[in-house]
Image: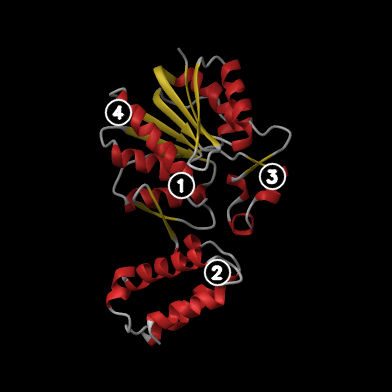
Amino acid sequence: MTFKDLKSSFQSTLSSYYDEQEIDSFFYMVLEKHHQLKRIDLALQPDLNVPTIELEHWHLVLEQLKTQKPIQYILGEAFFYDLRFKVNENTLIPRHETEELVAWILNEIKRQNILNSTILDIGTGTGCIPISLKKNLPESTVFAIDISEETLKVAKENAEINNVEVHFRQCNILEISDLENQYDVIISNPPYVRELEKKEIRPNVLVFEPHLALFVSDEDPLIFYRKIAVLAKEQLKPNGLLFFEINQYLGKETVTLLHDLGFATIELRKDIYGNDRMIKAKID
């Protein structure tokens, strides 16, 4: 079988589950991961054969995709800010919206010329935020915390994969009263999806990604933002910055929360899809 034939089989098998563009994307992601071949390679060698020994692997990938298991979990990796990150069932898959947050943070740090900043990421998951920041700010000192020991194992591996030093710590942010250091920048992308919003979540996310990192109660959806902001007030350095990724439906409520806690300079930004998605705040 040629790769061209395999691609056609991929399209016909998955056409009732995904659109054509998604299927194409999946095919080329597997092609590059397992054969070190890119789209251009097949264009130049249209009759290139699939090694027989690899056909069973492609079959297994197809079967998993039919269950709507995310391709990143199937491959065991995702790309974020041009870096490779290991992912598994203990971690959320890094999102493009979070890349926008990282870009904003980097721009602000460079604009304020605090390249040797001390940074804390709360609820780090794969470690994509602190690792990307450290990679782009080698003079900075970067810390990250998460509630899950298994998640932190993945984050530590990702720091090694990307050859950066990040100081990781396990703790439940809702149960601590001190962040241990003073910071120039504190960041969090905490759980923020309300239970009532589950009906909007795609099955590949709802079934496969860790609910601990996704959902909060309908009764107090800003619980993490409130606790982190209270801690940040005490442990941000003068002119320090607090960044959040937020629930798109609770932008105004999150801004009000921060204002009520004493943050006077607050900026709410939309993501590339036009949704309220991130906030920068500081205490004047």
Q: Mark 4 points at which residue?
A: 110
Q: Name the residue under label 2.
A: 65
Looking at the rendered structure, the number of numbered marks drawn on it comes to 4
Mark earlier in primary sequence (3, 4): 4
Residue situated in front as seen by the camera: 225 or 14: 14
Mark earlier in primary sequence (1, 3): 1
Q: Distance of mark 4 from mark 2, alpha carbons? A: 41 Å
Q: Position of residue 139 (x, y in %)?
A: 26, 33
Residue situated in front as seen by the camera: 128 or 12: 12
Mark 4 closeness class: few <14, some 14–19, many ≥20 residues within 10 Å:
few
Mark earlier in primary sequence (2, 1): 2
Q: Distance of mark 1 from mark 3, alpha carbons? A: 20 Å
Q: Does residue 162 show up? A: yes
Q: Mark 3 points at which residue?
A: 197
Q: Where is residue 8 in the image (x, y as percent from the top left)?
A: 47, 79
Label 3's element?
A: helix
Mark earlier in primary sequence (1, 4): 1
Of the residues shown, which amino acid type is indicated by label 4? Lys
Of the residues shown, which amino acid type is indicated by label 3? Glu
Q: Distance of mark 3 from mark 4, alpha carbons? A: 37 Å
- Residue drawn 51% across and 51% down? 150
Of the residues shown, which amino acid type is indicated by label 1? His
Label 4's element?
A: helix
Q: Distance of mark 2 from mark 3, alpha carbons? A: 24 Å
- Residue drawn 54% across and 57% down? 89
Residue situated in front as seen by the camera: 166 or 149: 166
Q: Name the residue under label 1.
A: 96
Of the residues shown, which amino acid type is indicated by label 2? Leu
- Residue drawn 54% across and 41% down? 147
In contact (CB < 8 Å): disc 3 and disc 4: no
In contact (CB < 8 Å): disc 4 and disc 2: no
Q: Where is residue 155 in the image (x, y as percent from the top left)?
A: 43, 48
